[in-house]
Amino acid sequence: MEFFELLKQRQSCRSYDKNKRVNNEDLQKILEAGLIAPSAKNSQPWKFYVTAGGETKNLVAAACQEKGMNMCLSDCPVLITIAKEPHKQLPGFELPIKIQDFRPVDIGLSVAQMTLAAKELGLDTLIVGWLNDKKIITALDLPDDTDICLVLGVGYATEGYEIREKNRKSFEEKVVFK
């Protein structure tokens, strides 16, 4: 698929075909796309926890479904939980510049690359930030201080699931040339 068409086709999927599994080769490609994403000082501040089917996947899905949200995750075959690794202060960078934690930006870039890789492979995704991190930590048997950022659902959309037209503000409203 041509790159700009790929950008237009990628959307948040909220209806997954529970009978179609993601093959391991495609899943590995998606994860590798996330791993090669750029990060500040090549810090790679992410850790991916993959659940594909089974009770653990169901527990992670349930932790994202409180108050009726993200119900489609029950049918989504793969959930990738993304945790933020602890911040590492880099020696030699005591410069008079704005100190900023780039980890959320880096994780966003990684997830964006995974969503585009999935779409290129014919899969759909849902980025979930509405979650109960404590329940996910318990489900995945992680240390209590694990910093869960997002869950990425990956699977095949149900047949006939339509690509929605992008409803965005105008170029002129959002871009300023100076």
Image (cartoon, rainbow, N blue to C red):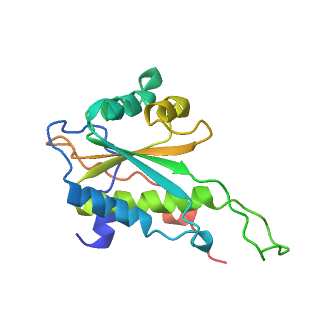
How many marks overall?
Answer: 0
Q: Name the image quarter holding residue 61.
A: top left
Q: Position of residue 35 (x, y in %)?
A: 43, 65
Visible residue check, residue 4? yes
Image position of 1 (left or right of 61): left
Q: Position of residue 167 (x, y in %)?
A: 41, 51
Q: Quadrant of the N terminus?
A: bottom left
Residue drawn at (22%, 55%) of the image: 24
Q: Is residue 23 above or below residue 140?
A: below
Q: Position of residue 159 (x, y in %)?
A: 14, 42
Residue drawn at (18%, 40%) of the image: 158
Q: Quadrant of the C terminus?
A: bottom right
Residue lying furthest top:
67
Residue drawn at (59%, 67%) of the image: 43
Residue drawn at (40%, 27%) of the image: 62
Residue in front for this viewpoint, 85 or 4: 85
Residue in front for this viewpoint, 87 or 64: 87
Residue in front for this viewpoint, 19 or 160: 19
Q: Name the image quarter holding residue 65.
A: top left
Q: Is residue 128 above or below residue 89?
A: above
Residue lying furthest right:
96
Visible residue check, residue 173? no
Image position of 141 (left or right of 117): right
Q: Is residue 127 above or below residue 60?
A: below
Q: Position of residue 36 (x, y in %)?
A: 43, 70
